[in-house]
Amino acid sequence: MGEASVKKASGWRSNKWVRAAIPALLLHCSIGTVYCWSIFSQEIADYIGFSKGATEWAFSFAIFFLGMSAAFLGNVVEKDIHKSSLIATICFAGGMAGTGFFIWFGGKNPGSVLALIGIYVCYGLIMGIGLGTGYLSPVKTLMLWFSDRKGLATGLAVAGFGAAKAIASPIMQSLLANLGESGIYKMFYILAVVYFVMMFVGHLLLAKPADWHEPAKKEKGQGLMATLKTRPISNYVGIWLMFYINITCGLALISQEKMIVKCIGLAGVVGIVSTVSAIFNAGGRLGFSAMADKMKDRNTVYKMIFIISIALTAVVLFTGGIKNGSSNMFLAILVLVLIMMVNAGYGGGFSNVPTLLSDHYGMGSISAIHGITLSAWAFAGLTGNQMAAWIVKTFGEEITTAEGLTVNPTGYQYVLYATLALYVVALLVSMFLVKPSEAGEAVDVH
């Protein structure tokens, strides 16, 4: 190999975009499509002969196992990102293919409990493991390569996770429309191959900087607990709680988003609103994290997110925006602004967690600490949607709009009362439990 070829090969091997940013986007843009579930959940339910409510648990299980696998496999990611990214690739693509198989089986045997359980296992457990390891694998690598702009780097990748729904939704809808009656399971087979290729390329490219040396194994075994003890435990509990509350509130509103939009008289543009809210979700991941790079204390971003959410929720409640939005365009716009900003804050909460943790606890065990913190996502995935659904079912009453749609405006308003109270708690936690920390203040325990 000539000198020029050696320099060229060495160049791409030490390029932070090739070794960190691009692989992170390939991984996150693939696994982020888990949020496309609502696009095809009704089709799956109809095809296998079960209610939509029964199939919805597959998505809840996927989010739960995402968080729990991240919590329990964080040390695996810490030790070997190549092993963890390969696990993510195999589990995510394999789980998707398995989901397709059990949908096919359910179509042949309508009402089969085996088909439903198979979907739970494949989409929920197996894909969930792929989600957790795939989500974690590139994050520390990004922060090491982009040490001067950690927030921007992690925000870019996590934005890929948030934008995946907006990118993949029209593709999935086109596949469903063009593959015929059996398109639902064929779509899963096709996507399994596409995402395996994307994630495997990301797996091959992903690498930490050559000058980064992990702590020795003996030290590393003690690293996680020793690092957490560098600050009061209430500090970490505070970070976990405000992360959990932000996700719970976000999921509660997002799960009712389509019905709220219909309730304020915008049923004809529900699809457009959904796409725009996904863009705000991705934009919040990138924007809030890039903004935090310029702040002395990244926790300030969470205070901003909670204050904005509290103010907008209170305004919509005070004006009765959801109840009166169908007859008042200004109130309808207020409701849409709330939806967009909650989506942005929901995304921003995700992208700032790893950098906030690194500012408080250093980089030595960041993958393991981040993984444990993602357990908040697991529990929020089981509580956010269900809390909102219970409130809407319990409070208020369904009415029929002029367009013939069945909605429960009082129920949706009560969801906002619950999220308002939770956002206030999160703000207090952010102010009094999470102590200020300058970037780099924490010392890595090696």
Image: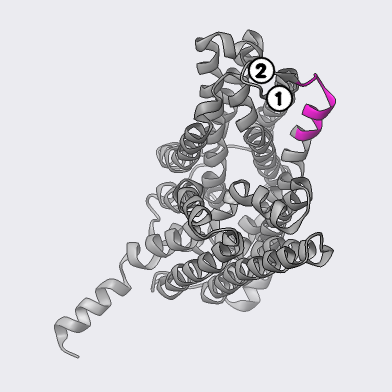
Residue range (magenta): 389-398
For residue 391: magenta? Answer: yes
Q: Position of residue 234 (x, y in %)?
A: 73, 42
User: Residue, x 57% and y 64% (percent of image)?
Assistant: 188
The residue lying furthest to the front in this view is: 181
Give 444 or 342, whichever is nearer the viewer. 342
Tell me the number on the disc at residue 401.
2
- Secondary structure, mark 1, is strand
Relative horizontal placement of residue 415, taking residue 254 as reference (left or right): right
Q: Are marks 2 and 1 in contact (CB under 8 Å)?
A: yes
For residue 169: magenta? Answer: no
Principal SS element in the magenta part?
Answer: helix
Q: Position of residue 111 (x, y in %)?
A: 81, 59
Residue type indicated by callout 2: Thr
Q: Quadrant of the C terminus?
A: bottom right
Colouring scheme applied when the structure was drawn: one colour
Residue 444 visible in the shown view: no
User: Residue, x 65% and y 51% (percent of image)?
Assistant: 43
Vertical arrangement, residue 199 with respect to residue 426, above or below? below
* The quarter of the displayed image where residue 128 is located: bottom right
Residue at label 1?
A: 406
Residue type indicated by callout 1: Thr
**Distance from label 2 to label 1 (Cα)?**
6 Å
* The quarter of the displayed image where residue 25 is located: bottom left
* The quarter of the displayed image where residue 83 is located: bottom right
Tell me the number on the disc at residue 302.
none
- Secondary structure, mark 2, is loop
Vertical arrangement, residue 37 with respect to residue 425, above or below? below
Local packing at callout 1 (Cα closer than 10 Å; few below 14, some 14-19, many 20+) is some
Vertical arrangement, residue 442 with respect to residue 331, above or below? below
Relative horizontal placement of residue 185, taking residue 28 as reference (left or right): right
